[in-house]
Image: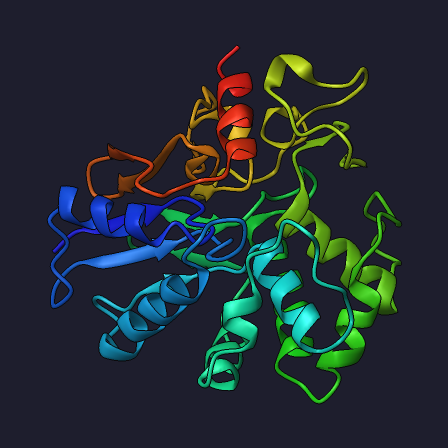
Amino acid sequence: MATYAIGDVQGCFKSLQALLKIIDFQPESDQLWFCGDLVNRGPGSLETLRFIKSLQSQTQSSANKTIVTLGNHDLHLLAVFFGAAEARTKDTLKPILQAPDRDDLLNWLLQQPLFHQDASLGFCMVHAGIPPQWSITDCQNFAKEVEAQLQSSKVKVFFQHMYGNEPSGWDNGLSGWERLRLITNYLTRMRFCTPAGKLDFENKGRLEDRPEGYIAWFESPERNQDELKILFGHWAALQGACEQPNIFALDTGCVWGNQLSALRLDDKTWFRCNNQEDLPKEALIKSERSRL
């Protein structure tokens, strides 16, 4: 039995299948963790969602159950479904929204957490990161606040309040929709922040592109998460490069023509496959720029 954490698939279904062949995935014994952004921008979002849902349905035992944490693109899909957001020009969500099993797929997606930890393996996983002033326990508790909204009768209202960049920094006194919005932004959108955790939403580049006064969330000297190793995705420009101990960047930009990556947690071995999709010219140009 092995456990593999996989970076942002974003609808790159062919690439996911190729990666599973590389790792010789055995569904009856191996466990897969997906760090979010299962869908969008890639050509196979519907197939990806159906496949991962089927894996989780088939593996109900705690020993090999498929784990998913929600990413910003997954939440965007749900917001569009609930009428709280408009589909964007570059979205590839239409096949899901028109699928006969749409409701079943999206109800399943709503049940997935924003944070997962496994103390026995010594790892936790989140889509974007954990703000420096939060402990692992804080993160788990705050994630549950958002998860409770996603699984409640207020889910549509939650999505109506989810979008926005304010507040940009944590305050224990935050309440209501502002609190939930910031928790969501930390867990699904964060890249650069100040050492105290104030977010920058504009810069999506490499570490050397950090804005003045900002650092990568995992570089903060104030970081308070030493209990477990942290897996995260979301930041394709890192290309999996992260030199901080116990921090593992899973997103290697498959949807931009690069690679899809898996980390075997048991021995920290990386596996990667090249993108297998037919991507639009825009994605390939972005891939080339990311190598400069």
Residue 270: % across, % down: 25, 32
Q: Please, is residue 43 above or below residue 156 in the view? A: above
Residue drawn at (44%, 22%) of the image: 241
Q: Nearer the viewer, residue 108 or 217?
A: 108
Q: Please, is residue 174 above or below residue 213 in the view? A: below
Residue drawn at (80%, 78%) of the image: 157
Residue 212: % across, % down: 81, 15
Residue drawn at (77%, 66%) of the image: 85
Q: Please, is residue 18 above or below residue 268 in the view? A: below
Residue drawn at (54%, 77%) of the image: 98
Q: How is the image coloured?
A: rainbow
Residue 274: % across, % down: 29, 33
Residue 90 appears in the rendering? yes
Look at the image and tell me in which quarter the N terminus lies: bottom left
* Res. 252 image quadrant: top left
Left or right, residue 236 beside residue 169:
left
Residue 119 appears in the rendering? no
Q: Nearer the viewer, residue 156 or 124?
A: 156
